[in-house]
Image (spheres, rainbow, N blue to C red):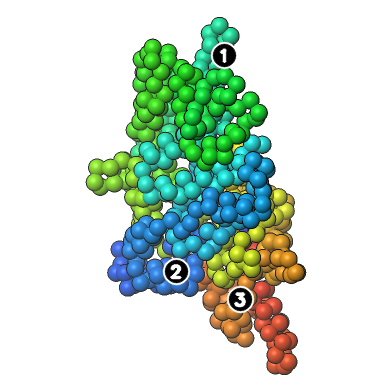
Amino acid sequence: MSERTSDSIAPAGLAALAIAGAVGGVAVVSKTIKSSRASAALSSVSPSSAARFLTQASFGATDSSIADVQSAGFQGWVANQMAMPISGSHLTFVENRINSRKTPPNKPTKALLFNESFWLQAVTAPDQLRQRVTFALSEIFVISILNATLQYAITGAATYYDMLAANAFGSFRTLLEQVTLNPMMGVYLTYFANLPANPATGRHPDENYAREVMQLMTIGLYKLNQDGSVQTDGLGKPIATYSHDDIAGLAAVFTGFSWYSTNPIATGPKQTFYPKLGLLPLDPAAIVNPMIPYPVYHQTTAKSFLGVTIPASTTPDPLGDLKIALDALFNHSNVGPFIGKQLIQRLVTSNPSPAYISRVAGVFNDDGTGVRGNIGAVVQAVLLDPEARDDTAATSDTFGKLREPIVRVTNWARAFNASSVTGFWQVPNTSDPMLLDQTPLTAPSVFNFFAPGYTPPGTSTNAAGLVAPEFQVVNEISVAGYVNFMQSVITSGLGPPPPGSRIPDVRTTYSSEVALANSPADLVARLNLLLLNGQMSAALQNQIINVLGSVAVPTAPPAAMQTALTQRVQLAVFMTFASPEYIVQR
């Protein structure tokens, strides 16, 4: 392939141009890789094809995970991953850290305690597919510990993430219900302690969750065909999936749910529905348990939404009404293409073909055994689809996605076997645009760090009708910040130094890479496999090899030789991570 400026690359080429400008490089379209296809025999899975698969299915390829995929094959690896138990509990980690910090349970706790747990599992946990899918789900079913209340309920945030992990391969209907009853979602989207309508005062139930559960978590704004295309009316206008009346009817369902209690009291000075001392309950158990119904506060008038009507009743039935509402959402024809496309975007490519979306949506509708909403089957369909497994897609201008910042750093940590000196993975908040502009569970709004339909305005991507979601966190500041941040991480490590040390907590020695540094070509070949799945262009390979050759390696003393070899490795790693070819996942 000849070199092309990023203006001709869609959807991810703009990042290539931005990073290239920051480091003085040029955007290069990755070369074709001729390796195994999904239909090939398991033994034919090449290292580069395995590494590419792991880029989509994990937080980054390692020597051992590449070998695992080659041994088991794509489908076998997925099956093995889904059979693994959950690695660990974020709640347990956070509680242990709180206890070790001797922080009373009702006092503010640092939001970074969840961050530590996230990095520990994302980098070191063996159940990598679950870890990666959980992260994807957290960007669809969004809560954020930037919320003024949630930042003081970090055990609740940890429990929420544990809940997503537990459902990563389970039933979408179960996940939807557990998200709905989770108190962190209740507080974040303000339907916690939601009161029924009162015609005398003009009060209406809070509509926030009713709107967002439809718009962002299940059916979207417009009616869809199975292939994700928008249905239109006779005038060619998109057909809305819901109206404000649907929102109002659904909001009435989400009334009367509040804090868990072993002795729920709806009214009076000791009521547990809405503690008078503040939004957080006095009982810490309420933060980590699903909300419970308080029937006296549940609206009993008729509730109509999405073609369903729950008749008026003299006896409040909050759980019965909730079941009817969630069943209606779950069974809506939009859910398969709407959720399926987002999972494809988070794992594989920003602009899947209509046929790809249709195949994945079909699996959501029926996993082959008559079961609807089997998330595990959907994930398998996303990763094993011929469009995902076609290695020649690396040459397509419309295939691929921008690697989001968190994934880039986990990739570094996993590829080079980074470890935490303290064992706590004390990664700081990286939300500053001069760092990564992203930290787990800290999205600026319910719309996530980036919207699935975002397209950079005034670009060829936009003109082509394509989307590039991750570009919503790309700007001049974040591009420069990323390059500077990664230079520091690659050369020094990540996080604050442990007591008595000047070296960051998360670090690596690059032992395997230093052993190759006397041969720049061999070193670059290794980085090509681990970081670019064998897709590194000849131009970039030669550029790195030439630069490494300028770093002289003395033959003595040994310490000086080791320092020079390490510098070669760090320079090669940095040039790779700053390259347009790495920033764009193919």
Query: Which residue ends up furthest to the top in the rendered image?
Result: 200
| Mark closer to the observer (1, 3) | 1
Which x, y percent locates residue 435? Answer: 70, 55
Q: Which tag, 2 or 1, sits closer to the chain's start?
A: 2
Q: Position of residue 354 (x, y in %)?
A: 39, 44
Q: Earlier in the sequence, mark 1 or mark 3?
A: 1
Q: Secondary structure at mark 2?
A: helix
Disc 3 on helix, strand or loop?
A: loop
Give whichever of 201, 251 is nearer the camera.
201
Three-letter amino acid code at disc 2? Ser
Q: Which residue is mark 3?
A: 510
Taking the spot 69% from the left edge, 78% from the top edge, the residue there is 567
Asked if the residues shown at circle 2 and circle 1 are in contact, with their CB atoms under 8 angstroms apart, the answer is: no
Question: Type of residue at label 1?
Answer: Arg
Identify the residue position indicated by label 1 in the image: 203
The amino acid type found where label 3 is placed reads Tyr
Query: Is 87 or 346 nearer to us in this picture?
Result: 87
Q: Residue 560 at what x, y percent from top left?
A: 73, 86
Label 2 sits on residue: 65
User: Callout 1: helix, strand or loop?
Assistant: loop
- Tag 3 and tag 2, C-beta contact below 8 Å: no
- Whether pointer 1 and pointer 3 mark residues with C-beta atoms closer than 8 Å, the reply is no
In-image side of 91 versus 40 (left or right): right
Residue density around tag 3, few if under 14, some if 14–19, many if 20 or more, within 10 Å? some
Relative vertical location of residue 486 with respect to residue 338 in this rendering, above or below: below
Crowding near the residue tagged with mark 1, few <14, some 14–19, many ≥20 C-alpha atoms within 10 Å: few
Residue 320 visible, this orientation:
yes
* Residue 38 seen in this snapshot: no
The structure residue drawn at horizontal position 65% and vertical position 58%, both measured from the top left corner, is: 427
Left or right of 574? Residue 291 is: left
Q: Which of disc 2 and disc 3 is earlier in sequence?
A: 2
Give the CA distance from mark 2 to mark 1: 56 Å
